Image (cartoon, rainbow, N blue to C red):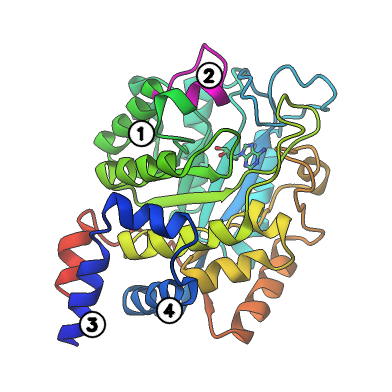
């Protein structure tokens, strides 16, 4: 046990050159994965948390160069769910066992703070045993505070890349890495469980950039870390770039599990889209969260962030039953529960295990 602890502690202190060695594919993935699985087992056992994902609007004012929802993609049919439609998703999701709902959208300026807050309040009063996660982009401190006061618990905002220079190559000049990071620190200060993350293999990304991502995550110490491979979308300036690697994403999931033993790490849709049952591989690499899509069917295919995104042909109950069966077959179990982040100080708590 003492040795095991030492090993894990040592693992938490990867130097830049250790990280680069791993990212250059020079280390043994199986070894890394085994360590990640053993850390994950000690913290979360075999449990996998599910989050019901509701993609409630694909309208976006931003023009990110990688994303199919970008404002200048005028080929995309846009939609926005009504409050009733959103609540119907929650009802279905709840019956299927979801105790976290994730409201995700493009940066749709239609929703005023008051309107969002009313929606948050209504979901939280109807489903008081559930956590509510928002993923609606960059807002002011005041707006985040209003969302939090209305009852939202968590917020997902990938930092996309920690390097200001790399960030500029992925986004229009109206956006900055500085503001993205400001949002994340504001969210954390307000009291949200915060999720950050990045794409693996995004255009112009270097392994040095990924090292910066790791260091930024260590500074932020988020509750959730979402990573997935970049996947090209035909109607974006990055249409001809090659997709990110599934293998490298899995390596990074294992690495992140070792660095952040308590983090809630999803096996993301992008992973599942590039490889059949990629999300199972994600769990086997150290992920402990799955986010089944519980949006209405008509909306799913319109939320086309990248080409070949899996939409899921099943309603909430069927897709969760399917995931559950798949996971059971490899020794994991879906939990009906909020699946909160257990601590704000992972390092201390983990060493005390
Ligand atoms: N490939 C993979 N992931 C993407 N995202 C946006 N566009 C793509 C793409 N082409 C990710 C971004 C964003 C999240 C909602 O989806 O990281 O934060």
For label 4, being within 8 Å of ligand 1 is answered: no
The location of residue 229, given as percent across then percent down, is 61, 49
Split into quadrants, the picture shows ligand 1 in the one at top right
146 w.r.t. 330: above or below: above
Spatial separation of the CA atoms under disc 1 and disc 4: 31 Å
Spatial separation of the CA atoms under disc 3 and disc 2: 51 Å
Residue 254 visible: yes
Indicate left or right for 314 with 170 as reference: right
Segment colored magenta: 167-177
Label 4 near label 1: C-beta < 8 Å? no
| Mark 4, residue position | 34
Indicate left or right for 126 with 93 as reference: left
Q: Earlier in the sequence, mark 3 or mark 2?
A: 3
Label 3 near label 4: C-beta < 8 Å? no
Spatial separation of the CA atoms under disc 1 and disc 3: 33 Å
The numbered mark at residue 4 is: 3
Please name the residue shown 47% across and 47% down the image. Answer: 132
Image-quadrant location for residue 163 = top left
The location of residue 102, given as percent across then percent down, is 54, 47
The numbered mark at residue 184 is: 1
Q: Secondary structure at mark 3?
A: helix
Q: Secondary structure at mark 2?
A: loop
Residue 311 or 56: which is nearer the viewer? 311
| Mark 2, residue position | 112
């Amino acid at each position: 046990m003492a040795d095991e602890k030492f090993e894990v502690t040592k693992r938490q202190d990867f130097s830049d050159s250790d990280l680069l060695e791993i990212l250059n594919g020079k280390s043994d993935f199986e070894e890394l994965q085994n360590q990640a699985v053993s850390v994950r087992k000690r913290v979360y056992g075999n449990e996998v948390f599910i989050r019901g994902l509701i993609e409630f609007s694909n309208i976006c004012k931003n023009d990110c160069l990688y994303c199919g929802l970008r404002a200048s993609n005028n080929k995309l049919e846009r939609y926005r769910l009504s409050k009733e439609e959103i609540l119907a998703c929650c009802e279905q999701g709840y019956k299927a066992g979801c105790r976290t709902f994730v409201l995700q959208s493009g940066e749709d300026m239609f929703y005023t703070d008051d309107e969002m807050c009313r929606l948050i309040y209504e979901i939280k009063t109807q489903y008081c045993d559930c956590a509510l996660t928002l993923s609606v982009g960059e807002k002011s401190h005041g707006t985040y505070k209003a969302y939090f006061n209305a009852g939202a618990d968590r917020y997902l905002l990938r930092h996309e890349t920690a390097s200001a220079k790399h960030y500029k190559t992925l986004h229009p000049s109206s956006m900055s890495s500085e503001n993205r990071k400001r949002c994340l620190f504001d969210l954390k200060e307000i009291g949200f469980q915060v999720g950050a993350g990045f794409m693996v293999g995004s255009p112009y990304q270097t392994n040095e950039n990924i090292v910066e991502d790791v260091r930024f995550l260590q500074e932020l110490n988020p509750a959730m870390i979402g990573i997935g491979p970049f996947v090209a979308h035909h109607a974006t300036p990055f249409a001809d770039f090659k997709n990110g690697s599934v293998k490298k994403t899995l390596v990074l999931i294992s690495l992140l599990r070792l660095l952040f033993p308590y983090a809630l790490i999803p096996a993301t849709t992008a992973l599942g889209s590039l490889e059949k049952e990629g999300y199972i591989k994600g769990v086997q690499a150290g992920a402990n969260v799955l986010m089944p899509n519980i949006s209405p069917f008509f909306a799913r295919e319109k939320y086309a962030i990248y080409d070949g995104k899996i939409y899921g042909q099943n309603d909430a109950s069927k897709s969760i039953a399917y995931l559950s069966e798949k996971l059971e077959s490899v020794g994991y179990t879906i939990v009906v529960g909020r699946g909160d982040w257990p601590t704000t100080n992972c390092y201390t708590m983990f060493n005390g295990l």
